[in-house]
Image (spheres, rainbow, N blue to C red):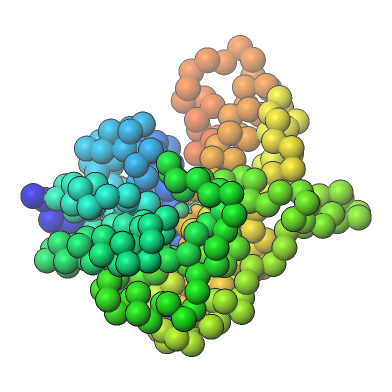
Amino acid sequence: MTSYKDLGLVNTKEMFAKAVKGGYAIPAFNFNTMEQMQAIVQAAVETKSPVIMQVSKGARKYANATILRYMAQGAVEYAKELGCAKPQIVLHLDHGDSFELCKDCIDMGFSSVMIDGSSLPYEENIALTKKVVDYAHKYDVTVEAELGVLAGVEDEVASEVSHYTKPEEVIDFAKRSGCDSLAISIGTSHGAYKFKPEQCTRDPKTGKLVPPPLAFDVLHAIEKKLPGFPIVLHGSSSVPQDEVDTINKFGGKLPDAVGIPEEQLREASKSAVCKINIDSDSRLAMTAAIRKYLAENPAHFDPRQYLTPARENMKKMYIHKIVNVLGSNDKL
Ligand code: G3H
Ligand code: 13P
Ligand code: ZN
């Protein structure tokens, strides 16, 4: 058993309380590679932002769980080396789908876990979440739950349509499950294709897709039921058009990729939404930079050559999110 406290990590409790009060959101960036980890830490240190580094089941499979845990420990030391005396870094399990997976992460030093029972019937979601909460709280590890279904792919769980979170259920769910934060469904979804073209309108000038707005009425109704309770938004990448255009220009094929407009995320950050999950935008930033570099430098084959601009491009994106969208800068 390793306590996250011995690794210099923190849980989400104080971080979320400050974010809700201060009207900003904490960035939750997924990481699978060393370059992502380095870019996240550099961005957080330069902007003086707390940060959640999250690991999915897929990331554990790709990179190895132990390696990722040591990378998070390394992230704390790296942040100090970069001049941050007291880094506020959370190591979080993203979309945990079983008690065993959550327990494994808690036992190896994660400071926060998500148990995603959103695909289960209501009572089963409560029971599973409570089981994880009972274990996690013994070690002061915080737990995120999910109520409502996001369209798209959630790890191995896929749903064609989204079901917005029902505001009338949230008090009972939060009380009986004991969760510390709640991921809700208000129209976001995972990946780079968040909406089908037929769900969108087209900007007559650019021809680009304009997605339907998020259900702010549902968010506000939930906030009214649970004043001050930390709310989480998954599937919150914006799918920047310049990155998509770069990918397509240099041999990629991402037609009609569309994300959540940043103005809407900015608005959500000012509410009880205090954690915003971003993964796809990092993937796009990395891929765009690598495609461009390799197309312009066809004789190069040292990964350090193309991973350097990839890391820089991800860092630029993380800083932009922190400063211009979530507002979590200057909070350390
Ligand atoms: O919510 C999904 C995250 O973007 C993680 O994706 O399961 O492909 O690692 P992944
Ligand atoms: P995106 O696919 O929009 O980046 O969402 C990531 C996410 O919700 C991770 O849990
Ligand atoms: Zn998610």
> Quadrant location of the C terminus?
bottom left
The front one of 126 and 64 is 126
Where residue 216 appears, as percent x and y from the top left, is: 61, 75
Where residue 113 appears, as percent x and y from the top left, is: 29, 57
- When asked about the image quadrant of residue 32, the answer is top left
The front one of 274 and 225 is 225
For the view shown, which residue lies furthest in the top direction?
Answer: 299
Where residue 26 appears, as percent x and y from the top left, is: 43, 66
Residue at image position (32%, 57%) is 115
For the view shown, which residue lies furthest in the right direction?
Answer: 204
On the rendered structure, is 50 left or right of 292? left
Say above or below: 184 vs 2: below
On the rendered structure, is 312 left or right of 294? left
- Label count reads 0
Residue at image position (46%, 25%) is 304
Residue at image position (11%, 66%) is 138
Say above or below: 138 vs 191: below
